[in-house]
Amino acid sequence: MAATKNNHESKVQEFYNEKVPVFIRRPEGVKDNSCTITLNGKNFQILYNTEVMVPRCIALIVEESERNERIAEENVQRLMGGDKRLGEG
């Protein structure tokens, strides 16, 4: 039983540590050439506008961050447009 659990944990770790490509566009107005992502005390410095290979766990953080930025921007646009679903009108 313990061997099965260790094997499963090992496969999960392999999945999250597998190198995958990531590309981060430089945001408007940002002068830096890179951004830093920190996970569990480990820093990853990623160049903007360059495809780089990173562990999947870092790529997932980038993906979630980009999704959250899009959602925030959509919410701002709705608020500025007086969207009734957000309590306007």
Image: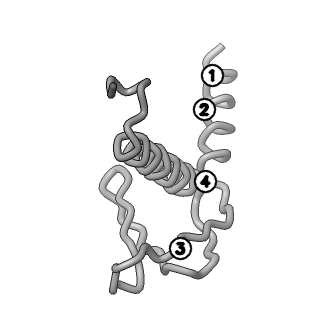
The residue located at (42%, 41%) in the rendering is: 78
Left or right: 80 in relation to 11: left
Structural crowding at the residue carrying mark 2, measured as other residues with C-alpha within 10 Å and reported as few (<14), some (14–19) or many (≥20): few
Tag 2 or tag 4, which sits nearer the N-term?
2
Q: CA distance from mark 4 to mark 2?
A: 16 Å
Question: Badge 3, how many Cα within 10 Å: few under 14, some, many 20+?
Answer: few
Q: What is the number of the mark on residue 56? A: 4
Residue tagged 2: 9
- Depth check: give the residue in front, 42 or 53: 53
Residue position for label 3: 25
Three-letter residue code for mark 3: Arg
Residue 14, percent from left and from top: 66, 47
Q: Locate residue 57, reporting x and y percent.
A: 54, 50
Which mark, by number, is residue 80? none
> Pointers 2 and 1 in contact (CB under 8 A)?
yes
Task: Give the label, 4 or 1, closer to the camera.
Answer: 4
What is the CA distance from the residue labelled 3 to the residue labelled 2? 33 Å
Can you identify the residue that label 1 sits on? 5
Residue sitting at 63 percent across and 37 percent down? 12
Instruction: Compare marks 3 and 2 and give the one earlier in the sequence.
Output: 2
Upstream in the sequence, badge 4 or badge 1?
A: 1
- Name the quarter where the C terminus is drawn: top left
Distance between mark 3 and mark 4 Cα atoms: 18 Å
Left or right: where does residue 27 sit relative to residue 88? right
Residue 9 location (% of width, % of height):
60, 32
Badge 1: few (under 14), some or many (20 or more) residues near its Cα, within 10 Å? few
